[in-house]
């Protein structure tokens, strides 16, 4: 059974990263990250704080749209085209099929999030130019833009001469190159002077906040998979948007009234609370002692695992009774 699940997961992963929407959303994420550097300059306070907030927001929203569109492509569309029959007709149960689909989809989402995070780190390292006379960060531009250009050239070369899939090769190449780019940038300042590694980087707390956002993307992916078992693309996206919105305002909408209202108390304990995964406001607070403790990370990870398991279980139940013949 495990081997069958892994086979479905591997096929789903490859199928997902080859979808046109996957590449489009990665390109959109990269463009938005670059534009954020300029947009964050329109503030009277600390521009880099605004860059941090809109950068993490970009990662979250792009992950949301990518999860909704990709989940529909790997489940709902297969049901509509009857291609799922070729899998279900083999000795593999529907629960194993859904679990395999989720694992493959989750792997593709994590890869997209990792690429977006690398671009985010480079954007934060570049920072907002406070004055027009401020120099651009040369290592960030050289390594960042160079990685994208080399990835496109390698993808085109392998596609033309060896028949490899362009998107797959390009994505693999850009992921590797951006990883090395982020590491190399840590050894240079804006003018190529050698500095102690990581002395001009984003803080570790920012990476921990990004990890919590990654957990949110995992939960959204499971919700999108459950919706795609019965719904089409647009309804799936709307449900995911509603889930994200209600989850982030659960504390404000229900928590403050939980002690005085039975309905609010029930809603507060039933509605999934995504607020603990958004800690950017705490990081932006004017405090030198703001930090994310490891215990908090452990509890948040466990909570995300419970939400994800619940959503996948709902997906199994919905798909179990879905007519696919």
Image (cartoon, rainbow, N blue to C red):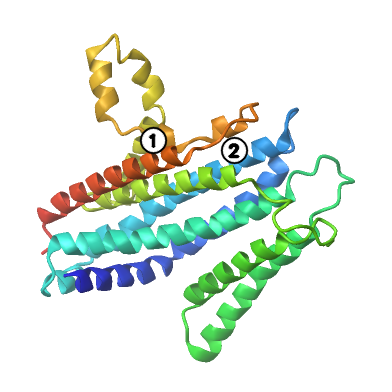
* Foreground of the two, 160 or 309: 309
Residue found farthest to the bottom: 161
Is residue 235 at least partly visible in the picture? yes
Report the residue at 58% width, 84% height from top: 157
Q: Which labelled disc corresponds to residue 148? A: none
- In the image, residue 275 lies at what x, y percent? 42, 32
Label 2, on which residue? 53
* Foreground of the two, 217 or 300: 300
How far is disc 1 from disc 2 in space, using C-alphas? 17 Å
- In the image, residue 325 lies at what x, y percent? 10, 64
> Which type of secondary structure does the marked residue at label 1 adopt?
loop
Label 1, on which residue? 274
Mark 1 surroundings: few (<14), some (14-19) or many (≥20) residues within 10 A: many
Report the residue at 53% width, 41% height from top: 57
Mark 2 surroundings: few (<14), some (14-19) or many (≥20) residues within 10 A: some
Quadrant of residue 280 within the rendered picture: top right
Report the residue at 20% width, 69% height from top: 2
Residue 277 located left or right of residue 104: right
Residue found farthest to the right: 133
């Amino acid at each position: 059974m495990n081997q069958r699940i892994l086979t479905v997961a591997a096929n789903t992963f490859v199928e997902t990263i080859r979808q046109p929407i996957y590449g489009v959303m990665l390109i959109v994420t990269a463009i938005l990250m670059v534009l954020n550097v300029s947009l964050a300059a329109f503030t009277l306070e600390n521009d880099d704080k605004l860059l941090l907030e809109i950068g993490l927001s970009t990662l979250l929203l792009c992950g949301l749209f990518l999860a909704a569109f990709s989940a529909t492509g790997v489940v709902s569309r297969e049901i509509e085209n009857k291609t799922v029959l070729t899998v279900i007709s083999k000795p593999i149960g529907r629960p194993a099929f859904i679990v395999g689909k989720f694992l493959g989809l989750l792997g593709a989402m994590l890869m997209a999030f990792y690429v977006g995070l690398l671009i985010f780190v480079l954007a934060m390292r570049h920072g907002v130019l406070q004055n027009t006379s401020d120099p651009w960060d040369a290592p960030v531009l050289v390594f960042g833009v160079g990685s994208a250009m080399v990835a496109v050239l390698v993808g085109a070369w392998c596609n033309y001469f060896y028949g490899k899939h362009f998107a797959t090769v390009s994505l693999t190449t850009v992921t590797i190159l951006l990883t090395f780019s982020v590491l190399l940038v840590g050894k240079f300042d804006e003018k190529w002077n050698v500095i102690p590694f990581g002395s001009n980087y984003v803080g570790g707390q920012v990476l921990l906040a990004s990890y919590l956002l990654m957990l949110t993307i995992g939960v959204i992916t499971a919700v999108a998979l459950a919706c795609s078992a019965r719904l089409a693309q647009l309804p799936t996206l709307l449900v995911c948007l509603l889930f994200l919105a209600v989850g982030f305002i659960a504390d404000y909408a229900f928590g403050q009234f939980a002690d005085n209202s039975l309905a609010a108390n029930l809603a507060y304990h039933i509605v999934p609370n995504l607020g603990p995964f958004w800690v950017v406001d705490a990081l932006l607070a004017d405090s030198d002692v703001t930090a994310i403790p490891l215990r908090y990370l452990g509890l948040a990870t466990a909570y995300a695992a419970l939400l994800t398991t619940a959503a996948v279980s709902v997906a199994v139940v919905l798909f179990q009774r879905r007519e696919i013949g």
